[in-house]
Amino acid sequence: MVMLDDGLHFIQRWKMGVSMRTTLSVLSRFLFVVIGIILLSAFVGMFTINGIHLEWNVFIQNIMDIVMSLIFPENLIILGPTQFEYSIFLNFWDYYLYSLTIFLSALFISFVVGLFITYFTILLPKKLIHHISKLVSLLESLPDLFIIMIIQFTVIYYLNVTGDLLFPVAGSSRTKTYFLPIIALSLIPAFMIYRINLHLVNEEWEKSYVELARSKGHNKTFIFFNHVLRNITPSLFSHSKMIVLYLLSSMVIFEKLFNIYGIFTFIITYPNPNVIAFTLIMFFVPVFVLYAIITNLIEKQTGKRLEW
């Protein structure tokens, strides 16, 4: 009985140790990214409208200013059109929430669409799957600018023919547009996710557990959603970082073309190192928290350790 109690205490201590190491690992990742953002912002701050100042003392001073502005947010000051100083928080949250809504919505839609296109594809004959894969690869290679132009011209053409505006094709300082930017931003990532999914599913489809499930009379839908999807989730998650980076890089273009008053427009309007660092860190926080939650859920469901 004593040995059993000792064993249970050892297991509990071991679990607490693993949990503590995991927490420290997550926090260290967050800290490293924040440091990277601070260094990048300090470097960008060496390029000003008054010239380029590639000097160590300027770089170090920028870092100190950024750190102090993060510790004391009242130091986050921007210059208005009349060169009047005012706090960043007067209009920052409108820009921030606008961009974050578009980004997270596009990320969610791209994964859902990519997943369901994969599911419907596996129900088709193998010859047709090959042709669809080629078509998706072609669509994936299309430039963002081309896709945006096609969508905007389609809406304008429909307006000219019917007199009805389906959706606003661009935003303004007073009105915000969500539907078209989210759909346009999610298209290419959805194709990317579809291609990755299809490759992973094809690998899983050749494994013995799928054959065993088929021999028990389970159909493709049951096997896909109850077995294959769970097994490909860790690999898909590891590829998701590429999707997130693609979305972030595309946001800069999309904000300009759709006249979106988002955080990247805010950074371009106020290219202060303190503002850049604070804005990028604030945008990174919800993405990091989302990744931490999803990582925990996947590890619990699959029992696999994920690196991200």
Image (tube, rainbow, N blue to C red):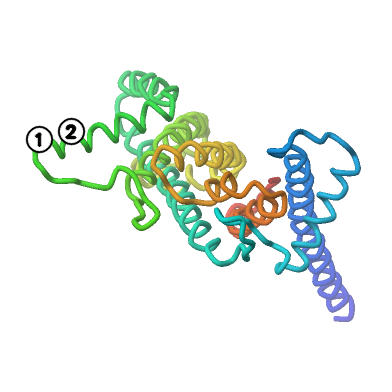
Q: Quadrant of residue 51?
A: top right
Residue 229 drawn at (x, y percent): 48, 45
Q: CA distance from mark 1 to mark 2?
A: 6 Å
Between residue 182 and residue 53, name the one nearer to us.
53
Q: Amino acid at mark 1?
A: Val
Between residue 38 and residue 194, name the one nearer to us.
38
Q: Are marks 1 and 2 in contact (CB under 8 Å)?
A: yes
Q: Is residue 27 depicted above or below 271 in this figure?
A: below
Marker disc for residue 157 = 2
Residue 112 falls left or right of residue 249 = left
Residue 194 drawn at (x, y percent): 43, 34
Q: The residue tagged with tag 1: helix, strand or loop? A: helix
Q: Which residue is mark 1?
A: 161
Q: Quadrant of residue 290?
A: bottom right
Q: Amino acid at mark 2?
A: Tyr
Is residue 262 among what the camera can see?
yes
Q: Is residue 108 depicted above or below 242 in this figure?
A: below
Q: Say which residue appears at 10% left-offset and 43% top-offset.
A: 163
Q: Is residue 118 depicted above or below 181 in this figure?
A: above
Q: How many marks?
A: 2
Marker disc for residue 32 = none
Residue 250 drawn at (x, y percent): 50, 37
